[in-house]
Image: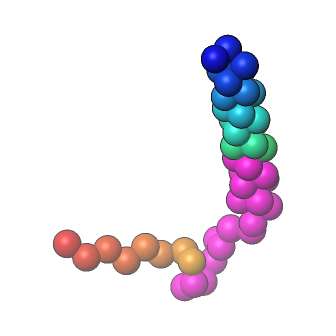
Amino acid sequence: MQQSQVAQTAQVLVLKKAMDIHATCALALLQALPLATSGNLGTQVNTMA
């Protein structure tokens, strides 16, 4: 019983670490994208009520 709990805890820790790495990589990719600052493409938000 205890061996399965240790295995489950290890799996959860590995999953959390993988999610942290994924979040870090996603943030780095988003920060690497250039932002549109002029022109009509990507600088305006159209909303409809």
Left or right of 43 on screen, residue 19 = right
Q: Which residue sits at x=74%, y=68%?
A: 34
Q: Which residue sits at x=64%, y=71%?
A: 37
Relative to 19, residue 6 above or below = above
Quadrant for the C terminus in the image: bottom left
Relative to 35, residue 4 above or below = above
Return the x and y of residue 46 as percentages of the image width and height: 37, 77
Return the x and y of residue 33 as percentages of the image width and height: 75, 66
Q: Which residue sits at x=57%, y=77%?
A: 42
Q: Residue lying farthest front?
A: 1
Q: Residue lying farthest bottom?
A: 40
Return the x and y of residue 43 as percentages of the image width and height: 54, 74
What's the image's color scheme?
rainbow
Relative to 11, residue 25 above or below = below
Relative to 29, residue 5 above or below = above
Quadrant for the N terminus in the image: top right
The span picked out in magenta is: 22-41
Q: Is residue 14 visible?
A: yes
Q: Nearer the viewer, residue 19 or 47?
A: 19
Exactly how many numbered labels are in the figure?
Answer: 0
Q: Is residue 20 visible?
A: no
Q: Quadrant of residue 10?
A: top right
Return the x and y of residue 6 as percentages of the image width and height: 72, 20
Q: Quadrant of residue 47?
A: bottom left
User: In the rendered structure, does residue 25 fall within the stretch colored magenta?
Assistant: yes
User: In the rendered structure, does residue 49 fall within the stretch colored magenta?
Assistant: no
Q: Residue lying farthest left?
A: 49
